[in-house]
Amino acid sequence: MAYQRPKGTADILPGESEKWQYVEQTARDVFKAYQFKEIRTPMFENFDVFSRSVGDTSDIVTKEMYDFFDKGDRHIVLRPEGTAGVVRAYVENKLYGPEHQKPVKVYYMGPMFRYERPQSGRMREFHQLGVEAFGSESPAIDVETIAMALQLLKQFGLKDLKLVINTLGDLETRQAYRQALIDFLEPHFAELSADSKERLHKNPLRVLDSKDKHDQEIVKDAPSILDYLDETSTAHFTTVKQMLESLGIDYEIDANMVRGLDYYNHTIFEIMSNSKAFGGNYMTVCAGGRYNGLVSELGGPDAPGFGFGLGVERLLLIMAADEVPLPVDDQLDVYLVGIGAAAAPATLKLIQAIRGAGFSAERDYLDRKPKAQFKTANRLNAKVVITVGDSELAAKAANLKNMATGEETTVPFTEIESDFKAIFKTAVK
């Protein structure tokens, strides 16, 4: 039989994987500037980690999670998103303790899993970059994290970005708004989709997030959460807006934006792109917000948090569609041509010395003729070609050729082995 990868997954092959490495390294560099440290959590967690945090009315929990019972009859789930697992790790490892600098700022990157219809930029195994900051209620954390997300996307070369923000207020705000939404939606109950009927009394804010076109028409006239903000929530959101403006960051407010996860409160945001990849329509690239109750929900102290997630597949799709140049450095420094079986020991020793000096180097492993080896060196864009044949073995000195200028020199084996950096610098100057 012909074996194939599971539906909704992808093989990331050489030539493509370098793009992923560039994205990941760029993210690490930006996160480092903001003093975020990497955290790595398991790809699978106990089911309750996500059902309690993401919310049992969310599409992720009700429709999309890969969950199963393991051989110990434990209910396990492949992580569908990054935040809940990071919060679990924060609580379990007591990162809220006095010995840890506050806020605790971490980032993660890796695969996530959701069972949904595969389409362009949306896979069943997908990859996220994300950050979380724990321990501060300051609006400055909201704004700096949003600013970092924008800086990261601009570093990737994305243009025509739009920042959309909203607030979900604190618990008192949500309770008041929840009842107002129920009062508004109940007369339309018969017209709502099946999902929204199910959510109406469990979590009516999720109805605002419905993808059903008829639901969207109904909620156009729904009351705005901005009319239900209490004094604390108003002050927080006002400060966020003022700080964004002080940084010269443009934004739009969408009062119906709630995000798809139940743990959010106060500031939420989406950064959207009108890339050619989406036909010129604005689509979300990066999103996140504040979740002040999530840590305590998973057994920790009442520690506030703020974070975002970014899909790598969608990012690369945008960069390809908009022809963003990727500065991928895959040029070969040295190709070592060996002529004849007698040259093999010497070429092996030399190429290991060259690699040990910090240079990328390749040689022939198929016993090909010199002409074929030189063709390979050209195809690989080698900066320098070193040749070792019978005459070079006799002289214990290799022929070195600068492929850009054609200039050739003879270099003793001992110098290549002891100080190749100096030789290379002279050869390609």
Image (spheres, grey):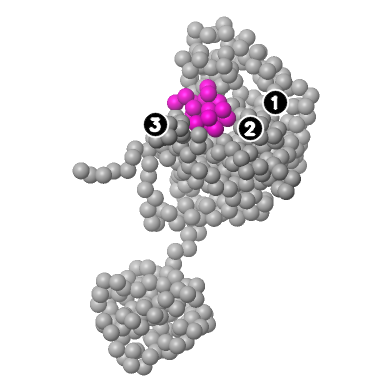
- Spot the residue most to the left: 1
Residue 299's mark?
A: 2
How packed mark 2 is, by other alpha carbons closer than 10 Å (few <14, some 14-19, many 20 or more), is few
Which is nearer the eye, 362 or 96? 96
Which element carries disc 1, helix, strand or loop? Answer: loop
Q: Position of residue 82 (x, y in %)?
A: 54, 39
How packed mark 1 is, by other alpha carbons closer than 10 Å (few <14, some 14-19, many 20 or more), is many
Tag 1–tag 3 contact (CB < 8 Å):
no
In the rendered structure, the answer to whether residue 82 lies left or right of residue 15 reads right
Distance from the alpha carbon under mark 3 to that under mark 2: 34 Å
- Residue 240 lies, with reference to residue 353, above or below; the image says above
Distance from the alpha carbon under mark 2 to that under mark 1: 22 Å
Which is nearer the eye, 424 or 69? 69
Residue 412 in view, yes or no: yes
Q: Amino acid at mark 3?
A: Arg
Please report the residue visible at 44 percent of the width from the left and 70 percent of the height from the top.
360
Please report the residue visible at 51 percent of the width from the left and 83 percent of the height from the top.
419
How packed mark 3 is, by other alpha carbons closer than 10 Å (few <14, some 14-19, many 20 or more), is few
In the rendered structure, the answer to whether residue 47 lies left or right of residue 132 reads left
In the rendered structure, the answer to whether residue 370 lies left or right of residue 143 reads left
Q: Amino acid at mark 2?
A: Gly
Please report the residue visible at 59 percent of the width from the left and 50 percent of the height from the top.
38
Q: Position of residue 157 (x, y in %)?
A: 55, 50
Residue 253 in view, yes or no: no
Please report the residue visible at 40 percent of the width from the left and 80 percent of the height from the top.
350
In the rendered structure, the answer to whether residue 2 lies left or right of residue 184 reads left
Provide the residue span drawn in magenta.
47-63
Q: Main secondary structure of the magenta part?
A: helix
Circle 1 sits on which residue? Answer: 169
For marks 3 and 2, the one nearer the N-term is 3
Circle 3 sits on which residue? Answer: 117
For marks 2 and 1, the one nearer the N-term is 1
